[in-house]
Image (cartoon, coloured by chain):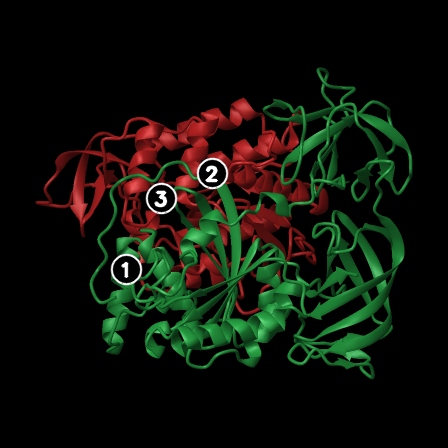
Chain colours: A red, B green
Amino acid sequence: MSDYRVSHLAALEAEAIYIFREVAATCQRPVLLFSGGKDSIVMLHLAQKAFAPAPIPFPVMHVDTGQNFDEVLDFRDRRVAATGVQLLIASVQDAIDRGLVTEPPDGTRNRIQTPVLLEAAEKYQFDALFGGARRDEEKARAKERVFSFRDDFGQWDPKNQRPELWNLYNGRVHPGEQIRVFPLSNWTELDVWRYIGEQDIELPPVYFAAEREVVDRGGMLFAVNRFIRPKDGEPVFTEKIRYRTVGDATLTAGVRSDATTVDQIIAEVAATRITERGATRGDDKTSEAAMEDRKREGYF
Amino acid sequence: MTQAPTFATEAPPEATELLRFATAGSVDDGKSTLIGRLLFDTKTLFEDQWDAVEAVSAGRGDEYTDLALLTDGLRSEREQGITIDVAYRYFATPERKFIIADTPGHIQYTRNMVTGASTADLALILVDARKGLVEQSRRHAFLCSLLRVPHMVLCVNKMDLVDYDEETFKRIEKEFCAFTTKLEVPDLTVVPISALKGDNVVSRSANMPWYQGPSLLHHLEKVHIASDRNLVDVRFPVQQVIRPHSNDNHDYRGYAGQIASGVMKPGDDVMVLPSGFTSKIASIETADGPLAEAFPPLSVTVRLEDELDVSRGDMLCRPANQPRVAQDVEAMVCWMDEQRPLRLRGKYAIKHTTADVRAIVKDVQYQLDVNTLHRDESADELKLNEIGRVTLRTTKPLLCDDYRRNRSTGGFIIIDESDNRTVGAGIIV
């Protein structure tokens, strides 16, 4: 340390901690979106570090599509209990039952998460919502600010973003408006995995390779579970797979892998040639601007 | 560039240092192609990204795969074939991790350029070898010098289209060096390249044996950035006070923040501004344990030996090395708002380090033409993308330094209080 240099991971961590503290100090009612996925687990870890030895000064919220991997929900509940933060659940199933949203004919609930998220933000009057999105994930995200302003309808206007200079973030909003905050903006998938390894952060088992019963749909391998049922005549076979992203269980595919440890995953990620979302997310395949469109509607 | 790349399978070793650079160029000078080339040749490009770009290129009937498509993210950009906003790109080599702030050259150039340059360790400016320096090259160089980007690289691109001619390169290099001597550019490197063909981008090109310098990537990997930080002046803007309110920690009181400059150690004498009270650093803490010393860019929690009244917006410094405590502030301001100009007597909110104050514009001294550096002293407002020198009077003192000495305590943003938009950026002079 005597030459006063820091590793790039230490620099990214310091930046993220600074961002968490800025929001806690300047916004009225922040909330951390927490799904039990690896990016949100890293976020929770960073939030704990930012305020230690004090507890995290805001709740966490899960927009639960009702179609999550059981292991991830178990992990979510355990992790939240160990941290001592308050967990709020915004339930998509409940919103369907109440008629706020309509179940799409294809049964995927990704897009109808947005009204549920916005309703919960309004109900609890959240003015700052932390998300784990990274700019390396997708082309529209590459242009989004760390503090991303959303209007009364939660909409993102890419042509009307607040300039972001130095480390001076403008989190000012009027009632009803929000800032979406992305402390991991400058991290890549590899950075996240290296940080998980360096900090020895626990993850749900779905991230590690195991023999799973799968079906092949359009080149993507979906594990058979209570949400993914083989269609008539659809071949089911066993593959050793792990998940690179963990979203809605009806949409998230696994990748063939032998990696059962974080170090092995890092080696695979470093060598992989397909983007994270491209490999595993059915929701981004709709069109070239799928993410941009969803963000405009208020998606994360 | 017509064949698909061969993709690496070996894992790169642990990257160690972070280098942020901003790219600037005018339309058609090949900036997007250069970034595509860097991503492509460092094997950062993913197969599905390549496939998508190839498909779009082929669909449009392009002669070669248009790497610019990699960086144009928004639908309106693809439709109009332009880049609207600053885009961030990432790549790593065994030496370093790189963050590129890719700023468009043609629209909102000043706003975007200033935004990208504000955090950059290095600025990369492109010119077309056939055209030489154009108005925008000078403007980009000026803005980078205004924002005190410590390192500058001029890439003379499209050398393949001038038959790799040394004289052409030398002429442009000489002209640019002459221009930058009038600016504050501490470190300048000039590299002849062809982004399209890959000459001197990743490795030295056999087409230009007369060029003895490093390839662009080699320079990006090796340029010495560790001493760019200010490690002399201790400046610790307090973000918030950590008080756990728990039985284990009921006496705990720590000041959380990111070190802006200087090196702090337990036992050091410190002064709290603006109050002027002094104490000693009892400990510097992180969630991973206490530190023997702390320096930028670490985020830490500082505890003092005495119970003092310290809150967000205050600053810790050394008693013998204090920032200015100023309510009358002279600054170069870059205006970024399309809707309303900066006006004499206008009132705004200012965010400076962790402090929020209000300010009134007491004087617009001049508006600067960034192409000619001519000063228009008759100006009494600054419109979108204009830069000028103004005098501000703030409601509370700013704890600040000259920007040229300290990029962290010398910069501020200006916010329109009616709609909370960020409308300008200021550099304290």
Q: Residue at x 42, y 29 (%)?
A: A197
Residue ID for mark 2: B16
Crowdedness near tag 3: few (<14), some (14–19) or many (≥20) residues, C-alpha within 10 Å: many
* Residue placed most toward the observer, B150 or B5: B150
Judged left or right of residue B404, residue A278 is left
Label 3 and label 2 in one chain? no
Which one is earlier in the sequence, the residue at label 1 or at label 2? Answer: 2
Q: Amino acid at mark 1?
A: Trp
Residue placed most toward the observer, B387 or B358: B387
Residue B50's disc is: 1
| Residue at mark 1: chain | B
Above or below, comparing residue A283 to residue A187 in the picture: below
Residues packed near mark 1 inside 10 Å, few (<14), some (14 to 19) or many (20 plus)? some
Whole-percent x, y for residue B352 in the image = 76, 53
Q: Is residue A13 above or below residue B331?
A: above
At horizontal 31% and vertical 61% (from top left) the residue drawn is A286
- Labels 3 and 2 touching (C-beta < 8 A): no
> Mark 3 — residue?
A248
Q: Position of residue A187 (x, y in %)?
A: 47, 45
Q: Position of residue B350 (x, y in %)?
A: 78, 58
Chain letter for mark 3: A
Cβ atoms under marks 1 and 2 closer than 8 Å: no
Residue at 12% across, 36% down? A237
User: Is A277 displayed left or right of A210 in the figure?
Assistant: right
Taking A209 as reference, is B154 left or right?
A: right
Instruction: Name the quadrant containing residue A139.
Output: bottom left
